Amino acid sequence: MRKRSIRTKIIGYVMAVSIVIVCLITSFMVAASFKMTDQTMLDTMQPMAKIASQNVSSNLHLLTERIYQLSQSVEIKTILQDSERDETDTETFLAERANEVEFVWIGIYHTDGSKYIGYGNAPEDITSQKYFQFLQQTGNIVIGEPAMLDNIVQLAVGMPLKTEEDTAYYLIGSYKYDILNDVLSNMNLGETGSAYIVNEDGVIVCDKDMENISKEVNVYDKYPESKEMFDKAINGQTGSQKISMHDMPHYASYSPVPGTLWSLVIDVPVEEFKKASVVMAALGVALAVGVLIIAGIVITLIVSKMTRSLRIATKRIEALSEGDLTSEVKETRTGDEIEVLTNALANTVKQLNDYISNIRFILGELSNGNYTVGTNGEYRGDFAALKDALEIITDSLNRNMGAMKSSAKEVSQNTNLISTHTQQMRQDSDRQIEAVTRLNESTNKIVSNITTIVDSAKQVKECSDETSFKVAQSSEEMAGLIANMDEINSNMNEIKRISSMIENIAMQTNLLSLNASIEASRAGEHGRGFAVVAGQVRELAVQSANASAQTADIIKNTSDTIRKGVEAAKILGVSLNEIAENTSHFTDITYNLEQVIVEQQSAADDVKSDLQSVDQIAGNNAETAEQTNAACEDFAKQARMLANLVAHVQIRNE
């Protein structure tokens, strides 16, 4: 997708804003113009209506003044005083007055409305006329409503003719309607505007269109949507407002006609007076379009001049992004931000050239072995980090190269030292091989002796096991003997208890026999036989006691003998146990000795195997020492090459 240029964007944005502003201003002006037209028309028509109504009132006053002057004439007063005066003279007088003041007709009427005398086409009776009713009601000058009579719109004016306080006649004069029509016709109401007068019922009584008068058109019927405005007018209010007549907006104003029950109404179509506003609005739009076109041309020229420098700067920036640092930057002298931009771009390109030249010089010196080089010049803003990085790199290279030189020297020295130690290790490996060979022979002899000792230990273990068995068997038999003697001792104790029981029975028997003897002696002759038996029983008791005593002595002696035998048997058992325990210890020692000897034999075998490994290792060490010596010589050669390589590098503090 192709990107739009900044020139196109600026022109588009400026023109869009300009169009919006012009449209808003034009819309505001058109709306303000229409609003101002409405306000101006309403403000103008209200005093117009008021002035027109006053003019109508003035003309009507003129008519009333004429009829009043006529009523005050000598001839009229004579008529009032002399009712028998010749009518011909009166008619002549009325005819002369009618010609002077342009009456269509003039007449004198009785108070009942019948004609007394008149000139012209004065009606014979006026009782049906509204002004006659007003004359009767008010007893003062009355102006009748315009009416069509003899194909002429006429306006009747009347006043009472009084004799002292009473009304004798009514003087009525009829004028042509032209006197009012001139007032309405002289008003400038545009092409289709109209002015008319309505009575208290809304009937049009004065209008330039005579047909409305002859047909007694009622405004409430003709313009029902404007009833509110006509109500205000008929109620004697003065004002102006915007109304709708037959769905068309109109300006309207109204004012009462002083001295009457009439109201003057003026209405003008809004469309007619807004044509000028529409034309002005169209001219304003055309002017706005012209201004926009001119502004677009001017803006295009200005923006083109501004963006030309920007395009040049943009192309130079694109070239810079592609690595072009040599092309010249064309600076402008516009005195604005574009000049600042091109100057800043030129400074940027110059500084980048300086930075890259300095970096190129530093890298070239480093590649040539000159590590003493430093960064020169001023690095601005974030480019200061680049300068710091270069200084860190050069410092690090100096440190590393210095460390490499020191390492090269140490490597060379360590290589010589390793070579010396390697030769010494070769000699030690040869001596180690000889010592291992001798140690291997000694180990073979030790292994042979250990085998003999193992056989002897096995024989000793067999004898020890047999002795232990015999001692254990004797210990078991002695334990049985001690148990038997313990049982005999226990039986002896039981015998001793029984003997003691017999001895106790003998004592009780002796006591019983003694008691029996005593009882027998008390019995006398009858108890003599019982006494003999008691004596024998006592002898037997004594014998039992003696036998029991002897038995007790025998049991005691036997028990002592058994106790001594038991104690001797226990001592012998303890000795046998100790012999068995010692025999067991000897057996364990013999077993442990056998295990140790076996382990020594295994260790000897391991030593023999390890000696073989050591012998092999010693041979490997000798071979390794030779290889290490060769590697040390090669390493020393590489160390000398490294030393020669870093020798031509120049570093700081050297």
Image (cartoon, rainbow, N blue to C red):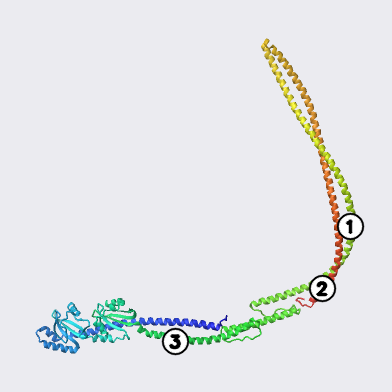
Q: Quadrant of residue 369?
A: bottom right
Q: CA distance from mark 3 to mark 1?
A: 128 Å
Neighbour class for label 2 at 10 Å: few (<14), some, many (≥20)? some
Q: Which residue is mark 2?
A: 638
In this rendering, would 322 be left or right of 153?
right
Question: N-terminal of the two: label 3 or label 1?
Answer: 3
Q: Classify mark 2: helix, strand or loop.
A: helix
- Callout 2 touching callout 3 (CB < 8 Å): no
Residue at position x 71%, y 81% in the image: 361
- Callout 3 touching callout 1 (CB < 8 Å): no
In this rendering, would 71 be left or right of 48?
left
Q: Which mark is residue 287?
A: 3
Of marks 1 and 2, the one in the foreground:
1
Residue at position x 89%, y 51% in the image: 449
At which x and y percent is residue 454?
A: 87, 49
Q: Residue furthest left?
A: 84
Q: Amino acid at mark 1?
A: Asn
Q: Quadrant of residue 472?
A: top right
Q: CA distance from mark 1 to mark 2?
A: 43 Å
Q: Which residue is mark 1?
A: 440
Neighbour class for label 3 at 10 Å: few (<14), some, many (≥20)? some
Question: N-terminal of the two: label 2 or label 3?
Answer: 3
